[in-house]
Amino acid sequence: MTAHLEPPVHAQPDMHAALPARPVPAADFTDEHTYRYTRLPVELAATLPPDAYTSPEFFALEREKVFASSWVAVGCTAELDRPGACLVAEVAGRSIIVTRNREGRLRAFHNVCRHRATQLLPPDARHVGRHDRIRCPYHAWTYDLDGACLGTPLFEGSDIPPGEETIFDTASARAFDRADHGLLEVAVDTWGFLVFVHLAPDAAPLARHLGDLPTRFAGHRLDQWLPQRRRTYDVAANYKLVAENFMEYYHLPWVHPELTKVSRFSDHYRWQGPGLYTGMCTTPVSANTAAGGWDGLRPMSGLGEQDAVSGRFVWLFPNTALVVLPNHAFVLFAGPLGPARTRETAVILGHPESLDDPAADAALDQLESFWDLVNRQDLEIVERVQQGLENPAYRGGRMCYRFEEPLHRFQNMVVDRMVGLDRIPDGDDDTMTRMFPDP
């Protein structure tokens, strides 16, 4: 079993009676005592307080304590395949630009002009603009791909009407140096096909966050995979419900009758080491049925014996699902927009070897249809959970099963950040821990 994040504490005789009444005062959201039952070992533990999913005050704190202090996956490296290509992402309520400079290096900046705070690029931007420059739409302050302020009018390319250049000449401005007014930088890094940003100025290396995942996925050559299909979903539920639903298999027989045919109940294992993630595995992956499945694309070559027959399921803290199978990958970016609102971006990727096949498009269509079916089933159920959490009579639930350990692990990561702890959970003693007994 995974090492406990806190020393064991004796459970109350009647845990439900001891759970905090609702609403929890906002000041208590950063108090370790508020989460004392979530800190118990999973066989004794209670869930996070319901207000963690419904309270605007909790959501505001969580933005700062979880998202503003974590490496957050915001997109795929293939979106940034040339200088000037960009993606615009929201992290902890801030709009962030990620682009690639002329030397091929990734750069990230707050999407804010240094003059009067105008948002520089719209959310759907895919290139920074003409001449690979980031230009403010308000007063034409312009920045290069490294964030340096190239100039305020007057400067080359500002489109000032001929003959009026002197009107915009800022040479008379006092104590002003363009070098002091570059874009506000954000830490950026990559792993595999994923791009991450970190808002804190003193961010620890991404490698610390990932733990042993780069080693576990080394055989998959994830840096070579390319996005092929994309869908978005608006979800009337807290992003943590999306996460918790992804990381447990307890619900499969009742919510996913089609999925249980290719990812059988008895073939599930916990698959996690040290790192800010939860990990699960289906092995072996079963063949497609009439309702669909994960076959179709040709598997990539060079996988190890176990990777060649397994599906790996990882939830990267705080808000990204990563599924890697022998022939494709599925990523879900769960963007929190409010206590009860999440926007999901789902991406299907393939390795070039798998895509080099005349039948690849049809196979991708089938995979997209199957993932859409599974995801919509999940969205319906997590929205019903959100509705239940709004009922003030519910004060928290009991976790007691070994296959809820990943959920317990995740919730304690959230608690750590809310109370100001920065630590990496330990991994399981066994490389793979069976989640259910043999049939």
Image (spheres, rainbow, N blue to C red):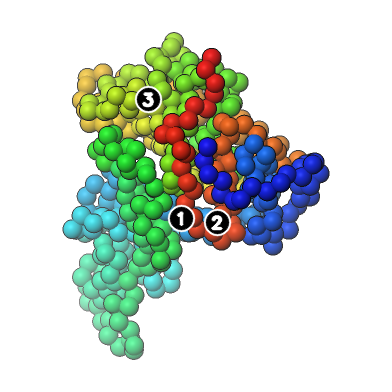
CA gap between label 1 and label 3 equals 29 Å
* Callout 3 amino acid: Ser
Gap between marks 2 and 3, in whole Å?
Answer: 32 Å
Specify whether 140 is left or right of 436.
Answer: left
Other residues around mark 1 within 10 Å, as few (<14) / some (14–19) / many (≥20)? many
Residue at left offset 28%, top offset 70%: 148
Answer with left or right where residue 11 lies relative to residue 167: right
Q: Give the mark nearest the N terminus, 1 or 2.
A: 1
Q: Which of 2/102 is in front?
A: 2
Q: Which residue lies under the disc numbered 1?
A: 70
Residue position marked by numbered label 2 in the rendering: 417
- Residue 261 x, y percent position in the rendering: 48, 15
**Residue 260 vertical position relative to residue 349 in the rendered view, above or below:** above
Tell me which residue sits at (56%, 49%) in the image. 5
Residue at (56%, 54%) from the top-left corner? 416
Query: Whole-percent x and y of residue 306?
Result: 33, 25
Q: Residue furthest top?
A: 290
Residue 135, percent from left and from top: 31, 63
C-alpha gap between disc 1 and disc 2: 9 Å
Q: On the image, which quarter does residue 112 sit in? A: bottom left
SS of the residue under disc 2: helix
Q: Around disc 3, counting alpha carbons within 10 Å, would you say few (fewer than 14), some (14 to 19), or many (20 or more)?
A: some
Q: Amino acid at mark 2?
A: Arg
- In the rendered image, the residue lying farthest to the left is 103
User: Which tag, 2 or 3, sits closer to the chain's start?
Assistant: 3
Q: Which residue is mark 3?
A: 310
